Image (tube, grey):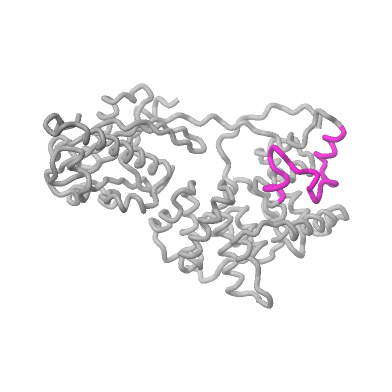
Amino acid sequence: MAKNPKAAKNRRPTTRRPRAAAATASADIEDLAPPSGCRAVAGPTTAAAAVRAELLRWYDANRRDLPWRRAAEPPAGSGSGRGEEQRAYAVWVSEVMLQQTRVPVVVDYYSRWMARWPTVDSLAAATQEEVNEMWAGLGYYRRARFLLEGAKQIVEKGEFPRTASTLREVRGIGDYTAGAIASIAFNEVVPVVDGNVVRVISRFYAIPDNPKESSTVKRFWQLTGELVDPSRPGDFNQAMMELGATLCSKTKPGCSQCPVSSHCQALALSSQNASVKVTDFPRVVPKAKPRSDFAAVCVVQISQGFGEGIAEAEGKDNLFLLIKRPEEGLLAGLWEFPSVLVNEGKTDTLNRRKEMDKYLKQLLSIDVARRSSVILREDVGQHVHIFSHIRLTMFVELMILNLKDDGEELCKEGPDSTKLRLINENAVQSMGLTSGIRKVYNMVKVFKEKRLKEQSQVPTRKRSRRLK
């Protein structure tokens, strides 16, 4: 999205607990970093051994049947080598997809992904656009970019890293993912801490501290490391995450069915004092209010050599202009319709079109007045898209142009032709566009269908050939 400098400038127990500071943003799971060199602690206590046995017994009987778990289970009689590397790849893909995405959504994406790229070698041979297309709708697209970059790095080195420390050297693999792969695929005795584990550990030890503070995060990793089962580290880590995702939920924990409830300090405190609830742990940290941004979005449809009217412009080989975002920052490297940020006080039609025309002319060599005739240009509506730290209001307009010359040549004249693309409607449907951009495109489709219906009801002699 193009930046308007002016817009950027004007943006605007019963123990008493201290007021928590607002979180700066929605934390990525890899931000829950452990202390340096964190591993499971040797020399288990009797209580820890009991917790391990009870939790693993429950997990064996109640774990959900998920495709990546089946892929991570070694066949009978299998040893090390490529089989372990294949399991590691399956764990890696699933864990990255599961970050900030619900399990039911991930199941279908994971299955399609593994059918397309069943090995790390096959993924490494893919293009970023192919990966984005497969990832479309999952959000947090940097995860897909890191998966591809990491796969290329692993293939280049010739072997899949087998320990948490070496896995962390791979692009995009942080402490959480490294621990998950190392323990589940390679049986390394290391802990894993995600949001579910934070909730379990907070309640298990009745930790009232801010779960976002570095000292508290360090404590989570240390306590989890002390509990990891040395003989089944992967299963134990999955059991902890499973417990947090099912019984030990945020608002309605099933304490009566919990396999380790007899060891839970939060439950013990709640039974002793009515003012204390299990759900008081972990402490809820208010999120920072997302900043409000405003953008003019112009869906540019190009119709070459057709009459002036929306009816004449439909059903032809119409092309839509897409622009590739910068390779760094928000939605890096993804395609979108021409967009430019505007000041909150200048979101009216006149100012938005002024900024958009300037953008198209200066950056894309499109002079709307000189190189085309405008068949239609109308506001379509607004769409609010919520990112973790931004509330973006998009003011959407449709502009149908009848070019006076070749559209493909038009794109080649831009400052960087690799960042411009003209595609037909079928390609728009199949490309890896973000959910926000797909929403914009669907808004435009509904708008055009409505206008076509209106035009069909107007007598031909009274129908205006130019829609303003």
> In front: 461, or 288?
461
> In front: 39, or 113?
113
Q: Quadrant of residue 161?
A: bottom right
* Residue 12 is covered by the magenta coloring: no
Instruction: Give residue 453's position: percent from left, percent from top.
Output: 26, 36
Instruction: Give residue 75's position: percent from left, percent from top.
Output: 65, 73
Q: Is residue 363 left or right of residue 202?
A: left
Q: Quadrant of residue 279?
A: top right
Q: Is residue 106 left or right of residue 208?
A: left
Q: Is residue 443 left or right of residue 316?
A: right
- Screen quadrant of the C terminus: top left
> In front: 37, or 162?
162
* Residue 250 is covered by the magenta coloring: yes
The span shown in magenta is: 243-272
Instruction: Give residue 372's position: percent from left, percent from top.
Output: 14, 39
Residue located at (19% from left, 51% from top): 408
Is any part of residue 171 visible from this angle?
A: yes
Instruction: Give residue 193's position: percent from left, percent from top.
Output: 67, 50
- Screen quadrant of the N terminus: top left
Label total for image: 0
- The vertical placement of 263 against 116, above or below, is above
Residue located at (85% from left, 46% from top): 262
Residue located at (47% from left, 50% from top): 142
Q: Residue furthest bottom?
A: 77
Residue located at (50% from left, 35% from top): 389
Q: Is residue 42 left or right of residue 155?
A: right
> In front: 288, or 235?
235
- The vertical placement of 28 against 148, above or below, is above
